Amino acid sequence: MSSTSPPFRVLKFGGTSVTGLERVEVIAAQVQERVADYNPVVVVSALAGVTDALTAAARAAASGLSYEEIEDGISAQHLSAARALLGPDAATEAGVVQRLDQLGRLLRGAALLGECSPRTLDSVLAVGEELSCAVIAAALRARGLPAKAVDPGRWIITDDHFGEAAVDMVATLEAVRREATATEGIPIVPGFIGASQVGDVTTLGRGGSDYSGAVLGVCLSADLVEIWTDVDGVMSADPQVVPEATSLEEMSFQELLELSHWGAKVVHSGAARLLRERGVPLVIRNTLRPDHPGTRVAADAGSGGEVPIRALASRTDAAVLQLSARAG
């Protein structure tokens, strides 16, 4: 990575953003727009609903219950996506069938042993992002982009706390810079997944794909991390409660973290903290409305102007208990 090369730009697409032909066309268009001025790195989540389905299948297999119907549903979802995006015979070429076979072996192993250890569960869950990555990379190549699905375990190094592994930022910095230099084309990185120092598959916990994007943005000194989802950025309130809510043009990381604490679940809070600490700005945009600018989040953005209240969030799962001591 020479000082004269274009800056890196990380684009992370969530589960709803990688589902369906129209949204994949948006991904291709957004990546294509950035190729001239940036080195884009794309991070993808599993298709919507797949992580929950994989969890259910693994638990059913380990409990001696029927898991085949869930497995068949996962297979059908990805084979259908591959055929819609790439044509009738493309699923094998994209590596989808290979990864589905891997999933079948893992589930059969859990059924035979009658258990699914945290280590095995991480391997099962990782298949979701790997499948999505394979399909999206092949779809981008079919649209003329030099996309390459990469092994996330060679990019993000973690401890061995399976289920919610902590990223080793020192080892990951070295790995990311090595892999980014060695990779020809546009890296398509499965989010949510890493590998321990000995190479075991690990996962980063719920919302971990956002964190993957933040880690890569920091390690690559990206000029910006873009998180693409299904909303127009951060809203001034919950639209289901306040129909007049509007999206915010900008806000500070501190404001974003406060909203997250009180119920607004737009971005993984760990990702926001990491980007704030390392000074990498963030933008949250809507794959369904790619022309909308979304919300910019940075240390120098936010309140301090004419708007005393920027946004509202609420929680329904909290109670206040007040205790007082009686004198005497």
Image (tube, rainbow, N blue to C red):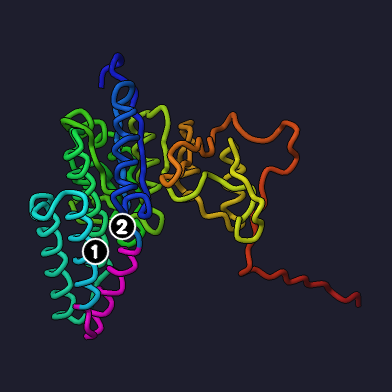
**What segment is highlighted magenta in the picture?**
49-68
Q: Is 204 on the left-hand or right-hand side of 153? A: right
* Residue under the point 37% across and 28% down: 221
Magenta stretch: dominant SS? Answer: helix
x%, y% of residue 272? 49, 43
- Residue 10, percent across and down? 35, 35
Q: In the rendered structure, which disc, 1 or 2, sits on the residue that comes first in sequence? A: 2
Secondary structure of the residue carrying tag 2 is loop
202 w.r.t. 145: above or below? below
What is the residue that sits farthest to the top in this orientation?
Answer: 4
Q: Classify mark 1: residues with Cα within 10 Å, few (<14), some (14-19) or many (20+).
A: some
Q: Residue 171's quadrant in the figure?
A: top left
Q: Does the magenta stretch include residue 226?
A: no
Q: Please, what is the three-letter code of the amino acid marked with disc 2?
A: Leu
Instruction: For the residues labelled 1 and 2, say whether their Cβ atoms are less than 8 Å apart.
Output: yes
Image quarter in which the C terminus is found: bottom right
> What residue is drawn where x is 14% and y is 59%?
99
Residue 66 belongs to magenta span: yes
